[in-house]
Image (cartoon, rainbow, N blue to C red):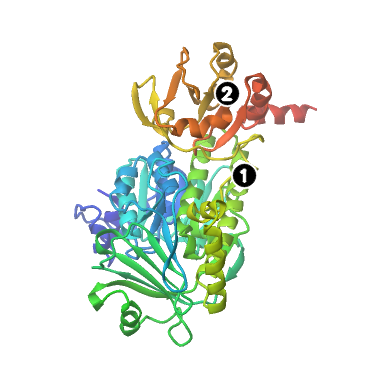
Amino acid sequence: MCVLCCRNLFLDNWTASYRFCTPLLVAIPEEELVNSIFRGRRYDVAICGAGPVGMTAAALLAARGLDVVVLEQRMTTSDEPKAISIDDEALRVYQQAGIADAVMRIMVPGTGTQYFDSDNKPLFHARAAVPYRLGYPFKNPFAQPDLERVLLSALHDHPNVDVHFGTEVTGVEQDRDRVTISTTDGDVVARYALGCDGGRSTMRELFGVTMSGRSYPDVWLVVDTLGDFHTERFGMHHGDPERPHVIVPGLGGRCRYEFRLFSGEGEPTDTPSFELIERLLRRYRAITPEQVERAVNYRFNAVVADDWQVGRCFLLGDAAHMMPPFAGQGLNSGIRDAANLSWKIADVLDGRLHENSLRSYQSERSPHAVATVRASERLGRVVMTTSTRLARRRDELVGAALATSEGRTFFEEMRYRPVQQFTDGLVVSGPNVGVPVGQPRAFDTIDQRIGLLDQSLGHGWALVGVDVTTEEDWANVSVVATLFDATAACVPVDEILPRLQQRVLIDVDGGLNREFDCYRGRFVLLRPDHFVAAAWYPQDTAQVTDVLSTWAPDFQTSHSESLGKA
């Protein structure tokens, strides 16, 4: 019997969990049942929060074989369509978790964002610089409740994942080896804990972690509607100073409208009136009360946590950062957090990485999160200004820039979005290091088929030799492959087929060569999150191996012992 359903036999909100699994109606004393939920179970990771970020982290950790428990104080998944845009980077993360196909079924394959000027005329359409570079559509509308249901269904399919709704976290204690989380249903013990519990994070509050940034006084109305006529595969940002607004069509007649409110039209504590909703939507559509799925007033924050790690506990998603919605990067940033941290925890527990490696989580993710928050603020100020003078000047400057090749590239390829590149953390300094490699198609000489790059290299470490075709060089670098249990493959950028023992990946449409051309003649070590950890020429293998070895627990232990003897 599902523990979640057993426990809910004794709760008033029984129907909340019924749609996820059908219980056996067995009479069990409530005290015995509650005390037995966590009895004797020790988890690798405990996750506080069953929103999209928490369940994404759980899916990634479970895919790597870890025992995971998810704790959520709500009685079920959210019915509020908060996040509405998921990008190609996030879909690649779901590919790692084995659920990308399921997520694709609940979204519209999007084509970016169209921006409109002061007169609500099209200004430019921002798209991916290289379509399908990561193996998925670029920016895709969806509904958060649908995503949460997909994620929960995937977690229920994992025998090593427990999900507990109606369980409130009340305290956290930790020592050198474990974390003990106190909940309303008893204590949970795990090696590590993740706080994925949103902007009002209990985990963050329990540790007294502060956030830096600011909140904005502007009030916005968000209305999620049904039965809408919009069928565009892109979001629309209208820079009309008289009423800045955003339109994002969704799947099956769903559509989100967001309007800037002015004095006297509403506060965040107010319930928006249907009369206001009807008036603001009138320029686009007629609407009935039954077609309003959700309507709320809100103010947005632009804040980042000062500490993302406290001992064995970590903050992810809105618990670590909150940002204005104008770049559509709130949820996607949280998924990046999960993608960055999950494989590191798995590798620490599997003995590939030293525990000190987990410190790289904040040093790698925080700078990009800060940059994304700032970019979202700037985008909001520029696109959503209520000053007629500034809006006209903006239109003139953008129009002039679009008349140039460089300016058109900047706007139409979204070059204003911060690039994620690591200069600190688990990277060996060098050219083109700390950046992600895309997922082009390639012919795999082992599998004898054409597929996406990750299908050939897997979701662990990978060692790629770009135009490195001598057996001696490959023999010398085998220690690196062994150190990280990495999949090895040769990528010949030129039109040759080297005669090597290991896997060779052949370009089929220009994409593979485009991704690896800058690494000609070098080995490239790819981390499980597809970022380049190191790139070096064969003659530098010994030197780079010495650096990479410091990430391993055996090196750290022997180094500490030698220091002690000294």
138 or 33, nearer to the observer: 138
* Marks 1/2: CA–CA distance: 22 Å
Q: Quadrant of the C terminus?
A: top right
- Coordinates of residue 347 in the picture (x, y in percent): 52, 35
- Coordinates of residue 315 in the picture (x, y in percent): 53, 54
To which residue does mark 1 refer?
Answer: 359
**79 lies above or below 500:** below
The answer to whether 264 appears left or right of 280 in the picture is right
Give, as a three-letter code, the residue at label 2: Val
Which residue occupies 46% across, 80% down? 242
Which residue occupies 62% across, 37% down? 427
Residue 548 placement: quadrant: top right
Residue 470 placement: quadrant: top right
Q: Which mark is residue 310?
A: none
**104 lies above or below 375:** above
* Marks 1 & 2, CB-CB < 8 Å contact: no
Label 2 packing within 10 angstroms: few (<14), some (14-19), many (20+): many
Residue sitting at the far right: 566
Element at label 1: helix
Label 1 packing within 10 angstroms: few (<14), some (14-19), many (20+): some
- Coordinates of residue 481 in the picture (x, y in percent): 54, 23
369 or 433, nearer to the observer: 433
Give, as a three-letter code, the residue at label 1: Arg
Element at label 2: helix
